[in-house]
Amino acid sequence: MWLDDRAGVEIGGGGTVCAEAKARSSSLRCCQVTPRRRRHTWAQRSRRCCRARGITNNSNNSSNNNSNNNNNSNSNNNSSNSNSNNNSSNSNSNNNSNNNNSITSRHSHSPEAACAAQLADQREHCGSEERAVERLRQAIELDKGDPIRSLQYRTNLGCALHRLGNSEESLEVLQDALERVHALKSSLPPSQCQGLASLECAVRVNLSCALGSHRKPGSFEERAAHLEEAFRLQPSSLDASFHLSASREEGGDALGALQILRSALSARPDDLNCLALACRCLESLGRHQEALAMCEKLCGLDPASTFLALREVFCCKPGDVFVVTFPRCGTTWMVQIAVSCIFGAAADYDAHAVFVEGGVASSASFVRALDELPAPRVLKTHAPADMHPGLERKSESELQKNGKVVYVVRNPKDALVSLRHHHANNASIGWNGSWDEWVDQWLAGKRSEEYGGTYFDHVKGWWRLAKLHPDRVRVVYFEDIKANMTKEVAAVASFIGRTLPSEELDQVCTRCTFEAMKGRHSVDDTIR
């Protein structure tokens, strides 16, 4: 989950023409979460599209080529029995065969179009959506003779445009695709339209995603109608189940959403998006302990889902203090300052503070332990602002009523160098590239994808949140602490509700000097 935006139900992926429309769109699956890319806001997940692949039949023998897809069609078979697997490129519906009732291709397939579609699929996997759009447009132009194949390309094009943020054109393309589905259905006898169910389901799910980007009056009702029909057409579709559940939860029917999710999770207990949505539904229903259990399962399957999972179940307590930074920007230093201000100058960092995502990565059960920690809690995290656990659920700017944040900013040049040393000297990371490579990757956010991307995005997000909530989020500069520690420590203490007598303030500053901190915490700054 915390992974690509998971935006796209793509159908096909190049290859030769299918003999059966059902085989053409049988292999619906979600994009899988990329573990290193942890920044996934709920808005991104709830608007993901689904994808379908696995078109590998031979048009030269379309009526007798079922073995290539392990998929046989019966004239009485309902599309709900297609039972497509979310991660499979081949369908295994295991139904009785009757080729006379399948939709066969009457048109020759363009090898050039197939090549373009395959290239589009490769571009999408590499994150080059612009090139994928170009290739899909080319495939549509080259393969106008096959209506089924054309529908697949158009659906994929709508997906790619949606992922690019071009919602207007995506909506136009997908609405046109749905009209083409209806036209094709009206030109065929009902017994030959069974295989179009998966295709229509995918188009409708994608349409709901595109409509979700508009938020125009009536769009919610229209989205819900598309999703209800998609689910009716193919109740086994994990993507239709997820989106319909999200729609119902958004409409206030958390219990109805949870019922659909439980059915989907019984078939795919490891689907990260369904687990995340189930956490939200359970919390909305006041079933906090069940939500925690679901959160533990989610984080156990994918620690990269920590931020999203905690957004659904974390409850701030009075006195909570979050110390947040981009990596290597003074986190440990500020945590010790906060701990000393709250628990006394001699208080130890390790005895009173926890590293949120680090604890969850070590053990998913830390989610429950974190919930049970007594207040006041000092919580260290590198979470981007829109994934802050202390935000109100379903909001990226409103804070829960409890909890304060101290956000530390450091000169980006120093942050770049410090993180490079950390990655080079950490055996589990083992960075051994050149400085030029490091600078390029750091500036692009490739060395900090799990924390929301670039240094500049991270700082900008928290800066905005501090402007919205100046009494709850305080920005502190690393260089200011070095220049005048007494002033900054006193300001931080006052911000978190502590008034330190001058003698105690001196003790805290003495314990938290840079030299004292380096003596207690190992810092290897050797340049390698």
Image (cartoon, rainbow, N blue to C red):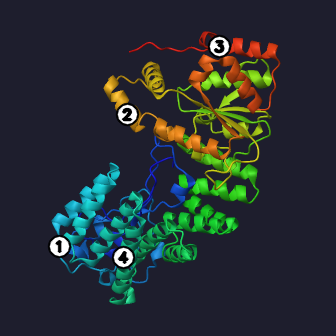
Instruction: Work out how far the residue at label 2 is from the one at label 4, CA to CA, in angstroms.
Output: 40 Å
In the rendered view, tell whether residue 279 sits above or below residue 114: above
Amino acid type, callout 4: Ala
Q: Residues within 10 Å of mark 2 (few under 14, many from 20)?
A: some
Name which quarter of the figure residue 160 lies in: bottom left
Instruction: Work out how far the residue at label 1 is from the one at label 2, CA to CA, in angstroms.
Output: 48 Å
| Disc number placed over residue 496 in the picture, else none | none
The C terminus, quarter of image: top left
| Mark earlier in primary sequence (3, 2) | 2
In the rendered view, tell whether residue 334 sits above or below residue 103: above
| Disc number placed over residue 441 in the picture, else none | 2
**Label 3 residue SS:** loop
- In the rendered image, residue 475, in percent from the top left (x then y), is placed at 62, 34
Pointers 2 and 4 in contact (CB under 8 A)?
no
| Mark earlier in primary sequence (1, 2) | 1
According to the picture, the residue beneath numbered tag 3 turns out to be 513
According to the picture, the residue beneath numbered tag 1 turns out to be 60
Instruction: Work out how far the residue at label 4 is from the one at label 3, CA to CA, in angstroms.
Output: 65 Å
